[in-house]
């Protein structure tokens, strides 16, 4: 909840973005589906829609993150 501006979007694949928190459908043993939050560890990209900036103007975008473990390295 530290994103500024607050309306940040996230993606698990770097292509499809949605407002945070990301949600997904999970099929239950009885066949019904329920929505659950995507774990933050699965987020791969963030973006903000800041609108149009006039020439010479600026805006600030920030997010505070904590990395708990190194990312797994890709093996060739």
Image: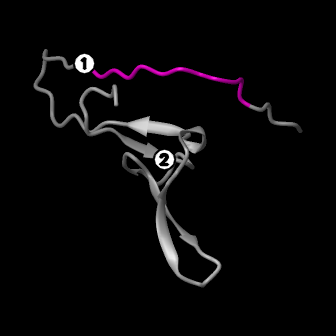
Mark before the other along the chain sequence, 1 or 2: 2
Circle 2 packing at 10 Å, graded few (<14), some (14-19), many (20+), is some
Residue at 38% over, 23% down: 63
Residue 6 in the magenta stretch? The answer is: no
Establish if 13 lies above or below 53.
below
The quarter holding residue 67 reads top right
User: Is 66 on the left-hand or right-hand side of 21?
Assistant: right
Spot occupied by residue 42 in the image (x, y as percentages of width and height): 59, 44
Circle 1 packing at 10 Å, graded few (<14), some (14-19), many (20+), is few
Residue at 51% over, 76% down: 33
| Observer-nearest of 53 and 64 | 64
Q: Which structural element holds mark 1?
A: loop
Residue that label 1 marks: 60
Residue that label 2 marks: 11
Q: How many marks?
A: 2
User: Is 39 on the left-hand or right-hand side of 5?
Assistant: right
């Amino acid at each position: 909840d530290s994103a500024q501006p607050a309306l940040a979007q996230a993606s698990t694949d770097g292509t499809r973005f949605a407002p945070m928190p990301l949600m997904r459908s999970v099929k239950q043993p009885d066949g019904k589906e329920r929505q659950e939050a995507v774990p933050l560890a699965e987020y791969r990209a963030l973006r903000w829609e800041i609108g149009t900036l006039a020439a010479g103007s600026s805006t600030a975008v920030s997010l505070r993150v904590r990395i708990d473990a190194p990312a797994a390295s890709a093996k060739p």
